[in-house]
Image (cartoon, rainbow, N blue to C red):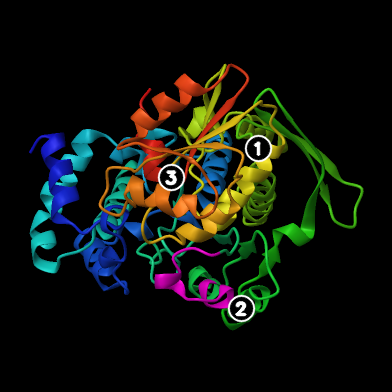
Amino acid sequence: MTYQDTLDYLYNRLPMFSRIGSAAYKKDLTNTRLVCNFLNNPQHAFKSVHIAGTNGKGSTSHMLAAILQTAGYKTGLYTSPHLKDFRERIKVNGEMISQSFVIDFTERIQPLIEEIEPSFFEITVGMAFDYFAQEKVDIAVIETGLGGRLDSTNIIQPEVAVITNIGWDHMNLLGNSLAAIAGEKAGIIKHNTPVIIGEVLPQTQPVFEQKAAAENAPLVIASHKHFVAEWKYQHHQLQVQLATTGTDIRNSYTLDLPGFYQTKNVITVLETVHQLRQLGWQITEAQVRTALQQVKKLTGLHGRWEVIHQHPAVILDVAHNEDGIKQVLAQLELTDHHHLHIVIGLVKDKEVEKVLALLPKEASYYFTRASIPRALPEDQLAAKAATFQLSGYHYPDVNTALHAARQKAGTQDLVLVCGSVFVVGEVEG
């Protein structure tokens, strides 16, 4: 098979959550274990950090991988979904998995695919673990896909488990209360393994404490240990001074991920680094500072308050659920611009009305859709938006919508593209 043949096979043969939604979600780890048994259990061949959470787990994973790389460790990184290239999901020291490995792996595992009918995600997890084992990585940062307890990645025994936060997302699969969602994410907490929680809510803190106690897992709530003393958003960078609670300790960092919401993620990352140091990983403060200034360059992260054009400013952000959109709107308050233009597409299985209710009525809207079956048709999105007094036009694809926004925008205006990872991923250039 050619590389394109291989991708066509993977996309079309395997149920893919990003395309079809919950029908692709396998609610147990049986297939993942069968896949990894077939591959001689590569997940046992490397150390790992496991990261779950509703929002911020992608940024947290990339920041941590950048730090480990800068500290001299050969670092694997598994994240999902990808924006443009399937191989973004699996990287070693910021370099994407080779096309030849994807082809060879798929040909090797094809008989098992035909036998057990796994999901796309189950196979990509197996591919990542196999690649990291063959590459002999020192450590891999593994991001969960959805939830935690039944997520395909949850067969690893990590050095540290991390849960960034809990918010409303995927309620149809994870539960209809924050405590229920927290219970699913808490499934990555392992026996005698430190767990860092980024942020807690009154409904979620007891869930984490009970699970950690049951597993004898040392638990740290990062937001209780550290807080942001000062911050400044300047030249598309975020300058942050972090304080340690109950001490005079202040540390300053410059982040190339400029969204204000990264202040929460960096607190989680720094506490994770502290826990790794306790376990013997050699990571200096200078290496942390160096890495945080160039996360995008080191790991290839995109779509987090990413400025792709000036005059007018065009910014991409993969925010797609209620909490994520709130964070982006807070960032907009910090940004100088004349008029706001929003290019937005959503998927059917999100709480569309809750997102629309948050959006500013004074902005101009360009409703669109990503080219996936889960996408809410752009005319339906425009009709729903009109009930929230959001006005604009609808367009059949992302780039047509973005072109219209840029044509209409003045040089001091701001164009934001958001609503779905897949919308952002389809932006050309």
Magenta stretch contains residue 174: yes
Q: Which residue is mark 2?
A: 207
Number of numbered discs present? 3
The N terminus, quarter of image: top left
Residue 354 seen anywhere in this rendered image of the structure = yes
Q: What crowding class fits label 1: few (fewer than 14 Cα within 10 Å), some (14-19), or many (20 or more)?
A: some
* Secondary element type, mark 2: helix
> In the displayed structure, does residue 264 sit left or right of residue 48?
right
Q: Position of residue 342 (x, y in %)?
A: 51, 37
Q: Nearer the viewer, mark 2 or mark 1?
A: 1
Q: Amino acid at mark 3?
A: Leu
Q: Nearer the viewer, residue 177 or 386?
A: 386
Q: Residue at left 47%, top 55%?
A: 48
- N-terminal of the two: label 2 or label 3? 3
Q: Residue at left 90%, top 53%?
A: 247
- Residue range corresponding to the magenta coloring: 168-181
- N-terminal of the two: label 2 or label 1? 2
Report how far apart the C-alphas of labels 2 and 1 lie in the structure: 33 Å
Q: Amino acid at mark 2?
A: Val
Q: Position of residue 81 (x, y in %)?
A: 37, 48
In the rendered image, the vertical position of residue 4 relative to residue 278, given as above or below: above
Q: What crowding class fits label 2: few (fewer than 14 Cα within 10 Å), some (14-19), or many (20 or more)?
A: many
In the rendered image, the vertical position of residue 396 relative to residue 116, given as above or below: above
> In the displayed structure, does residue 39 sit left or right of residue 403?
left
> In the displayed structure, does residue 258 sit left or right of residue 26?
right
In the rendered image, the vertical position of residue 365 relative to residue 196, given as above or below: above
Q: Nearer the viewer, residue 83 or 364?
A: 364
Q: Which residue is mark 1?
A: 332
Q: Amino acid at mark 1?
A: Leu
